Image: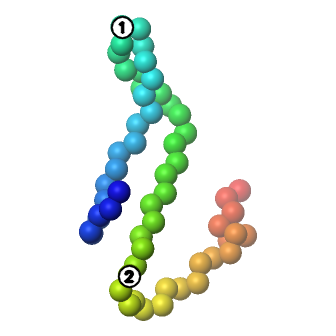
Amino acid sequence: VRFQEDLRVTIQALGWRSGRRYLPLQDDIASVAYWYQTLPTASFPALPDRDYLEII
């Protein structure tokens, strides 16, 4: 999927009920998006290390 300025996506987990009706599920869903910068830009700050990002 390519986009120029912004991208908005809605994700929903659906299953099936009897009678071919949708069943909203409570699944854990994860996603990621990458932005590829092709033009020159200022330097970004260093990313924090994994110890800083750990959730306890």
Say above or below: 46 vs 22. Answer: below
| Residue 52, picture quadrant | bottom right
The disc labelled 1 sits on which kind of residue? Gly
Give the crowd class for mark 2: few <14, some 14-19, many >=20 residues within 10 Å: few
Residue 32, position as x, y percentages in the image: 49, 57
Residue 25, position as x, y percentages in the image: 47, 27
Viewer-closest of 46 and 32: 32
Viewer-closest of 13 and 34: 34
Nearest to the eye among marks 2 and 1: give it. Answer: 2
Q: Residue at x 27, y 69 (%)?
A: 5
Residue farthest toward the left in the current orientation of the protein: 4
Say above or below: 33 vs 29. Answer: below
Q: Which residue is mark 1?
A: 19
The disc labelled 2 sits on which kind of residue? Thr
Residue farthest toward the top in the current orientation of the protein: 19
For label 2, the SS is: loop
Give the crowd class for mark 1: few <14, some 14-19, many >=20 residues within 10 Å: few
Q: Residue at x 70, y 69 (%)?
A: 50
CB under 8 Å between discs 2 and 1:
no
| Quadrant in which the N terminus is drawn | bottom left
| Quadrant in which the C terminus is drawn | bottom right
Residue 8, position as x, y percentages in the image: 31, 55
Disc nearer the start of the sequence (2/1):
1
Q: CA distance from mark 2 to mark 1?
A: 50 Å
| Left or right: where 30 falls relative to 49 | left
Q: Residue at x 48, y 90 (%)?
A: 43
Residue 38, numbered label: 2
Q: Residue at x 52, y 42 (%)?
A: 29
For label 1, the SS is: helix
| Residue 46, picture quadrant | bottom right
Say above or below: 2 vs 17. Answer: below
| Left or right: where 40 falls relative to 43 | left
